[in-house]
Amino acid sequence: MKQPTLIDYVFLVVLAIIWASAFFNIKIATYSYGPVTIAFLRILLGAIPVVGLCFFKKIKIEAFSKDWYWFASIGIINLVIPFFLIAYGVQKVQSNLAAILMASTPLSATILSHFFTSNEKINFTKAFGVLLGFSGIVFLFSDNILINENNFLPALIIFFASTFYVIGGLLTLKISNKKNENVTASMLIWATIFLLPITAYVEQPWNLNPRLDSTISLIYLGIFSTGLAWLMRFRILKKNGLVFQAQVAYLIPIFGIILGYIFLNEIITPKVIVAVVAVVLGIYFVRKSSFRKVKSA
């Protein structure tokens, strides 16, 4: 991969902002919509630009091929479950907390990859990064101003949601020989099919009288934070590689805190600052070890 240019870094920062902005928009969407409806419409609207790209580039979508069960399983685990759990948890906690908790995904991935892959074993640097990052999460749960007996469980549920992203990522390795656009489009299609009857039965969104800001946020979540963000991710991966794209993990919790403060006037306590620093440093040490391995390969 060639040396990243200024425009490449601009794309990286914009991707981080779009993904970080998902959290405060989820919060706004919960003012009118239930978590199942949020997950469903986010996936449905997100599928439109990805499927459109596949048609434009003449990429075959294999959602209903012989590998359909992989796409269906990954769609449920990597999209349906975490999208629902995050929307459910954000009803009770600040969006900036969700951004920090979800930033722990690379740390969880390091632990699970050690057991379920042959080339991603934990070493001292990774172990230090994982311990440091999770120490920040534990410290965050001690913040009685933002997390108490009324929202402790929702906060824990958001943290738990990050694990499903990791499991979905590991399952994706089973079909790693397929194009990213095809895999993502197929996942989104199956996730939409799965959630359609559940949404209709459980929440019946056609009976709602939603606020305008909630509807705008939900449309934004689908088109930008899901669909457009995935397309930008493809562009960065193709041009600059996984190592460069992985740096987005450092920026998401930082932008999540800033955007939550700007748009929702969310409280930023000293423990929030300490926690996000610990998580970002933890991700840094985990990535540092992985980057060293890539460079020496």
Image (cartoon, rainbow, N blue to C red):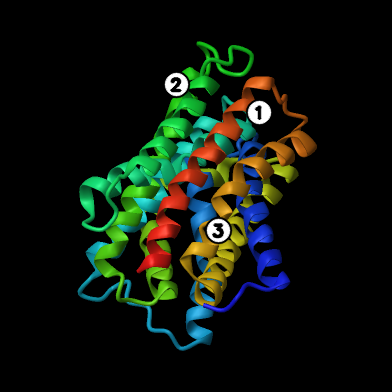
Rounded to the nearest whole Å, what is the CA distance between mark 3 and mark 1? 27 Å
> Would you place residue 196 above or below residue 158 in this image?
below
The x and y percentages for residue 70 are 25, 63
Which image quadrant for residue 176?
bottom left
- 247 is higher (above) or lower (below) than 61: above
Q: Is residue 189 visible?
A: no
Give me the disc on residue 226. 3
Measure the C-alpha gap from mark 2 to mark 1. 22 Å
Check contact, mark 3 vs mark 2: CB within 8 A: no
Q: Which residue is mark 2?
A: 153
Query: In terms of sequence position, does the residue under pointer 3 or pointer 2 come before the other?
Result: 2
Residue 37 x/y as whole percent:
51, 45
Which of 157/118 is in front?
118
Q: Earlier in the sequence, mark 3 or mark 1?
A: 3
Label 2: which secondary element: helix
Residue at 67%, 65% in the rendered image: 9
Distance between mark 3 and mark 2 Cα atoms? 26 Å
Identity of the residue furthest to the front in this view: 296
Secondary structure beneath label 3: helix
Query: Between tags 2 and 1, which lies in front?
Result: 1
Q: Are marks 2 and 1 in contact (CB under 8 Å)?
A: no
Task: Determine which of the numbered discs, if any, sits on residue 156 in the image.
Answer: none
Given the image, on which type of amino acid does mark 3 rest?
Answer: Thr
